[in-house]
Structures are given as C-alpha cells and as structure tokens.
Image (cartoon, helix red, strand yellow):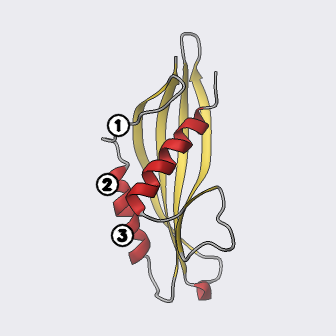
Amino acid sequence: MLNPNIEIKKWFYTNLTSSSALPVYDGIAPDSATDEYVIMTGRTSAQEQGKISYTNAVTMDVDIVIKNSNFGYKRAETISDLILKAINSETNITLANGFYASSLVVSAIRNLDGLNHLDNVFRTIITYNIIITQN
C-alpha cells in the first residue's frame, strides 16, 4: 500500500493551478507570496478496506487566501466558483501508481476571517472528500 495523499495532491495541484490561475502552495505559503494564492492543506486519509485492494477515504482542504484593501469575501468566493466548476462531483480523476478515485464530494465551503481584521485577509475554504482505491 502506498500513501494515497501523494497522488491526489499532485492531481489537485495541477487542477487548482489551471482553474484558478493563482499560485498554489502545499501546506503553507512563503512570506514572499502574492496577495492572492491557494493553499492545499488539511490532508487526511483513513484506510477503510484492505483485503483485496486498499481503499482510503481522503480529505483535502483547499484554502483560497485574498489579502487586499477591500472588505468582504467577494474575490475569494469568485475564485472558489472557478475551482468548483473545475473540481466537483462530476470531475474525472486520473491518478498514477494503480490508484483510482471512485468518488469526489464537496463536503463543506466556509469563509474564514484573518486573525486581525485590520489585515484585510479573507479566506474561503473548500473541503473535498475523495474515495481512493489502490489495486
């Protein structure tokens, strides 16, 4: 059994970059990041079955971060719409190393304020649940 998070991370990176046209980071953005970017975070995986093949329930958070002088979530929500058009329950996921995804579901979309309201940081987080099997 291999770690399914590695292959799904590669797939998400490619699709997030093409759908949002923003920089995409794994886990944390550098201090030099632009004012708009996406972070792939919150990856978890739990094996559900393992006798014939390895089936895992995987969760991936996509964190859209906007820093600007405006107030509100409009820009972050616009980018979330672009991502949701590209990555949704109808999306075909192609993975390597014998993995295949049988299900992709958006389990949550939530807005999150920055720690300091004066910073004008607005975030929209999309949580995806994916069922991945490796033969």
Which tag, 3 or 2, sits closer to the chain's start?
3
Disc 3 crowd, CA 10 A, few/some/many (<14, 14-19, 20+)? few
Disc 1 crowd, CA 10 A, few/some/many (<14, 14-19, 20+)? few
* Residue 112 x/y as whole percent: 54, 69
Q: Give me the C-alpha separation between circle 3 and circle 2.
A: 11 Å
Which tag, 2 or 1, sits closer to the chain's start?
2
Q: Is residue 108 visible?
A: no
> What kind of residue is marked 3?
Thr
Task: Assign the N terminus to one quadrant of the image.
Answer: top right
Q: Are marks 2 and 1 in contact (CB under 8 Å)?
A: no
Query: Residue 121, relative to residue 112: is it above or below?
Result: below
Residue at mark 3: 78
Residue at mark 2: 85
Q: Give me the C-alpha separation between circle 2 and circle 1.
A: 13 Å
Query: Residue 46, relative to residue 26: is it above or below?
Result: above
Query: Residue 51 falls in which quadrant of the image?
Result: top right
Could you tell me which residue is drawn at 38 percent across and 49 percent down?
Answer: 87
Query: Residue 62, relative to residue 45: is it above or below?
Result: below
Residues 112 and 20: in front is 20
Q: Secondary structure at mark 2?
A: helix
Could you tell me which residue is drawn at 47 percent across and 32 percent down?
Answer: 95
Q: Secondary structure at mark 1?
A: loop
Residue at mark 1: 92
